Structures are given as C-alpha cells and as structure tokens.
Amino acid sequence: MIPPRNLRVLYVAYPLLAVSDKSAGGAEQILWTLEREMARRGVETTVAASAGSRVSGELFVTGEPCSLPDDFERRNREHQNNIVEFVRACSQQGRAFDLVHDHSGSLWPRAAEIDVPVLATLHLPRSFYSSAMFTDIPGNVIFNCVSASQAASLAELNPAVVPNGITLSRFEPDLRPRNGLLWLGRICEEKAPHLALEIAARATLPITLAGQIYPFSYHQQYFEKEVLPRLVQMPSAMFICAPSSEQKRRLLRQSRAVLITSLADETSSLVAMEAAASGTPVIAFRRGALSEIVRDGITGFLIDGVEDAVEALARIAEIHPLHCIQYARLNFSSGRMVDGYERLYDNIAARNEVTEVLGS
C-alpha cells in the first residue's frame, strides 16, 4: 500500500468526552486507532477533541469535556466554532489541511465554511440523524459508512464503505473453561442492558454488566429505572461502571458468552469484534450490521428476542473459541480498516487536485 501523499489530516472527535485508548464510545475508539496508525504511516495528523485527550499527533483542544448533564448542545457549538476558526487560521498561516475527517457526526453540515474536503464517517443509524442534516449538503463533503447495511440506508449519498476494525494484538484469548455472561457497552435505552439481565435471569446464569453512563439525564434515568432495580434483585449480577481497557479485555476472555441486546439497527459492533478476537461467542439481536459481523453458528448466534437468546445459550458449547479467533483475524483487523481509509484519502486527494486544476 502506497502511503497517502504527505497528507495533513484533521480528525474531528465527538465533543462530549476525551479521546484516548480508554475511550468507551465506538466512534472515539475508531478515531483513536485510525489516527495512531495513520501517524505511524507518515500522515501528519491533528485531532480536534476535548481537553485530556491523548493522541499520536498534534492535539487541538476545543474545550473541556461535559461535566454537567445535558450540556451537550452548548459544548457541541463551542467544539464546532473552535474547529472552523482553527481550520481557517491554519489555511491563512500556510498550514492548510488537505482533509478534515469528521467522526463527530455533526460538523460536516458546516463544511461550506471551510475550503477543505470533509470526509464524514457516519457511526450511527440513519434514524439518529435529523433529516435536515441530509438536505443542502455542502459540495466539499464526502460520506463514509462503516457497514453495507448502513450504506444501503443512505444510498442516495453514494457513500464509500470502510468497515471498522480493532487492534487484534490487544486481545489475548483464554481457552480455559469460562463462566458467566457479559454485557458491555454504553448504558442507555437503545442498547437495552435490562434485556441482558432478563436473559441471564431466565437462563439462571451469572452476568456482568460493564459500561459507562454518559452525562445525559435520560441515560441516568434509564439506568435508575430499568437497570438498577434488576441488579438489586439478581445476586448473581454484577455492575462495573466505566471499566478500564484491561478490565474489558479480561472480562471478554473470561466470559462464557457476550450478549448484545441492542434495539437499534447497529451500524457496526466493536464489542462483537473484540469478543471474537478473545475467542468468546456472541449472542446478538439480529439488528443492522450485527448480521454482517456475527457469523451465525460460527462465532455465535443471531437471535430475535429474549426466548431465542435463552435457547441459544443452551447451545453455546457448539461455538469453538478457535473458530471465533480465526474469523476475527481474517475479518476485523485494524490494519485492514486503515488500508481502506488510505485508499479513500488518496482518491479524495486526487479528486481535489483535478478540481483545483480545472478551477485555475
């Protein structure tokens, strides 16, 4: 793979929390992994993110992370305004970016305010974006989706598709006997950890819920109303708030199975990828891209509800850890993801050069 032609790239993070190898959110994890590998490959990288972020290249701090519930709108405006001013200032100082790679899910509608191509990787289902965001799209915006199912729902945007990947070397399989179930992710209604607790209770199996509650009042209310009472009633259930990266990896390799109970049409699933890399079967609701990531009968089972999940758990011994590991190594490498973005960056750079020649 030929490295992108000495590109200078600005990566735009989600504004809520800091970005590091400890990030909980999928978009933050992908940005951190991608920026680190691109920097290693010779790209001049800058990350626009909250204070406290840890990145490989330059960090442009757009403000402090949210510390109060429901402070997102103010923080996002601050984040965007500072980025637009920063990009303009860099151009005026002769340090223009060749590309802005937006992982925030909300900067790209303002792309007309800067004279730089903007690649918007969409990490959420279409229904999570307002319809207004897909009208009057600035001409310098290029979209990327992270799965085929997501791209099909946004076909009129003619998006590229670069699937997510993980750093496989960070996950060490454990082939010894395992015990208990694991649910891992953001604690919110659409991820439905309460259903994971219900599945575990019906299957009479212990379960660990490990995840982060974001600073939104409706997330906190969901936890207090739907999750906490179930935890109290289940002595075999454990909750780990905001687990460390090492804790997550240990839980993944020691669990009998990982439950993914999302009620949203997932665009990807780093948890499913990480479980496979750890040799751990996944039982997942058949939603969105989960059908692309979980190989039914090989790396786990795709199910359609709580009762299906209980039945699948009775068959979990049919899934061999080595098959999960092999599938992960063939399909979920971060190197494969970065190769895809290299090709996309190079295509955007070439297209921009042609546009500049025709416009001169």
Image (cartoon, rainbow, N blue to C red):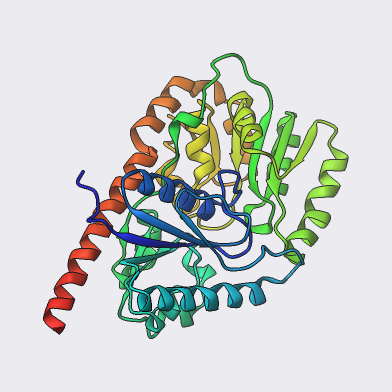
Which residue is at the front of the view, 18 or 227? 18
Q: Position of residue 18 (x, y in %)?
A: 61, 56
Compared across the picture, whether 28 is left or right of 142 comes to: right
At a point 33% along the width and 79% down the height, the residue shown is 115
Q: Is residue 283 above or below residue 215?
A: above
Which residue is at the front of the view, 357 or 101? 357
Label tally = 0
Q: Is residue 326 above or below residue 110?
A: above
Indicate the quadrant containing the C terminus: top left, top right, bottom left or bottom right. bottom left
Compared across the picture, whether 111 is left or right of 307 comes to: left
Compared across the picture, whether 163 is left or right of 196 comes to: left
At a point 35% along the width and 81% down the height, the residue shown is 138
Which residue is at the front of the view, 360 or 207? 360
Q: Is residue 240 above or below residue 144?
A: above
Compared across the picture, whether 249 is left or right of 149 comes to: right
The image quadrant of residue 177 is: top right
Which residue is at the front of the view, 82 or 159? 82
Note whether residue 268 is visible.
Answer: no
Q: Residue furthest top?
A: 176
Q: Position of residue 249 (x, y in %)?
A: 59, 31
Q: Position of residue 353 (x, y in %)?
A: 17, 70
At a point 35% along the width and 37% down the height, the residue shown is 331
Q: Residue furthest front?
A: 93
Note whether residue 336 is visible.
Answer: yes
Q: Is residue 351 above or below residue 266?
A: below
Indicate the quadrant containing the N terminus: top left, top right, bottom left or bottom right. top left
